[in-house]
Structures are given as C-alpha cells and as structure tokens.
Amino acid sequence: MTPFKRPISDLPGDPRLLELEYRLTHDVSSAEDHDGLDEWTVSIRAKRFRNRTVGGVIGSMTLFRLRQDTRFGSHPWADAEAYDEALFNLVLGIYDLGNGGYRQAFRDTMVSCDGDLLVLSDVRLDQAWRGFGLGPILASQAIWTLVDGCSAVAVETTVSELPEDRRSLSQEEWTQANGKITALWESIGFRRRSNPLGHLLDPRTAEARDLRNEQRRRFDALAHAYHTDPSH
C-alpha cells in the first residue's frame, strides 16, 4: 500500500533535485518599529530534469522572525502590527501587550523564552507536486534552517486558499479543511497550546527533533519510490 495520496508516477521530477533558496528582506528605515522584523522568502526550485520540461520555481514559503531583543524595541508585536494585520493577529496571543515580552502562558509552556519568535506565515506548492507529502517535508526543512536562536515557531492553522473554482466552502468543508491543515502542521511538531497561544512548535524539545528526523525519513522514502518506479 502506497503511503502517498497520488501514484508515484505522477511525481513531476526527482525530489532530490529540489532546492530551497532563502531571501531575507529588511526595510531600510529610521523607524525603530521595523528594526526587529525579518521577512524570509523561501523559493522552492526544481532543477531542470533530464528529458523533461519541468523546472524553475514550483512553490514558496514566507517566514517572519520577531526579535526578542531590547535593542530593537521592547514590544516585538509592534513590528508585526506595522507590517501586516494578519501577522499581528497571528502573534497577538503570544505577547504581553501591556508589559512587553512574552505572555506568562507562553513562558510556562516553552522550554526556554530567551529567544526570538519565528512565524511560518504562508506555504504554497504547485498542484502537480501535491499529494506526495512534500509540503510538510519542505516546511520542516525551512523551519529548522531558520529556527536557531528562537524560542518557538508559530503557524496559522486555518484555510487561506479557496478551491480552484473559487467557490465558498460550506461549514462542513471548512471544518474538514482546517482539520487537515492542523494535522499537517502537527506532523512536523506544532502543538495546540492553551488559549490564546495557538499552535506552537518548541524547537528545544526531543519530540520536535524526532519529528524533524521523521520528515527526513519520509523524504528519503519518497526519493527511493521515485527512483524505483518503472515509469521514471
């Protein structure tokens, strides 16, 4: 029984020829509120495969790093608010808006609270590459590449993309879609915390590291399946 949702013969190319390209964007500004916000755009690129036309950018991820450092201001959430309402709403429950820093609930939950906050904001993958588990594999790799020095990673777990026909989802479809998204993020280490923290990944736990290694094993299994499939 295949562990993938689609036949391995549908995979457009060798997953071992995928690469992640990281680009850091930081405003040039005299305003203190922008000093502590780093925006990372991670492009998912497929190298040109032999005898195939596939190649180029096949997806992207956006991550933000909010620096917990008084040199950049005492209210990291203000950086998120100045950038974008959606980002601000995502981190709103994590920060103590009155006193600055993290909420006590966050401090009671995380192994360490002396680091920054990394936010996985958006993940997009071309339809042709979906159904093989690459989404969580690639997201996990991007997170662990950027997470050094962070206390936690936050993520949005609600639907952000309409169906291809652009129709509105029914309540049942909405619930099912959100459940699938939540299960996907939980497979790489995100856990639902007490309100109002939302889903957080604690990179300093053994469970998070084990799930990172599990995604690596899944990638190896996908690559092996591709190379042993007669159609490739």
Image (cartoon, rainbow, N blue to C red):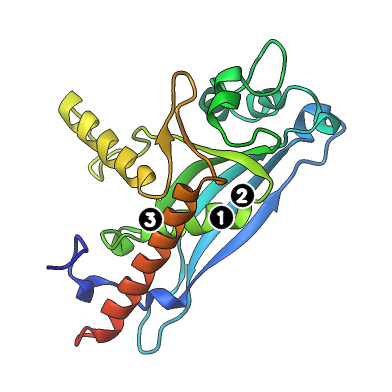
User: Type of residue at label 2?
Assistant: Val
Q: Which is more toward the observer, 229 or 208?
A: 208
Name the residue rendered at 12%, 68% in the picture: 1
What is the count of numbered marks? 3
**What's the distance in space between the residues labelled 2 and 3, CA to CA?**
18 Å
**Quarter assignment of residue 218:** bottom left
Mark 2 vs 3: CB contact within 8 A: no
**Quarter assignment of residue 226:** bottom left
Name the residue rendered at 59%, 52% in the picture: 41
Disc 2 designates what residue?
147
In the displayed structure, 124 sits above or below 137; it is above
Q: Which is more toward the observer, 81 or 108?
A: 108
Mark 3 vs 1: CB contact within 8 A: no
Disc 3 designates what residue?
135
Name the residue rendered at 53%, 23% in the picture: 89
Q: Which is more toward the observer, 196 or 84?
A: 196
Residue 175, how many percent across, how many down?
Answer: 22, 29
User: Type of residue at label 1?
Assistant: Trp
Q: Is residue 55 left or right of 172 when viewed as pictured?
A: right
Mark 1 vs 2: CB contact within 8 A: yes
> Helix, strand, or loop for circle 1?
helix
Label 2 or label 3, whichever comes before in sequence order: 3
Q: Dot 1, how many residues are within 10 Å of its Cα: few (below 14), some (14-19), or many (20+)?
A: few
User: Type of residue at label 3?
Assistant: Gly
Disc 1 designates what residue?
144
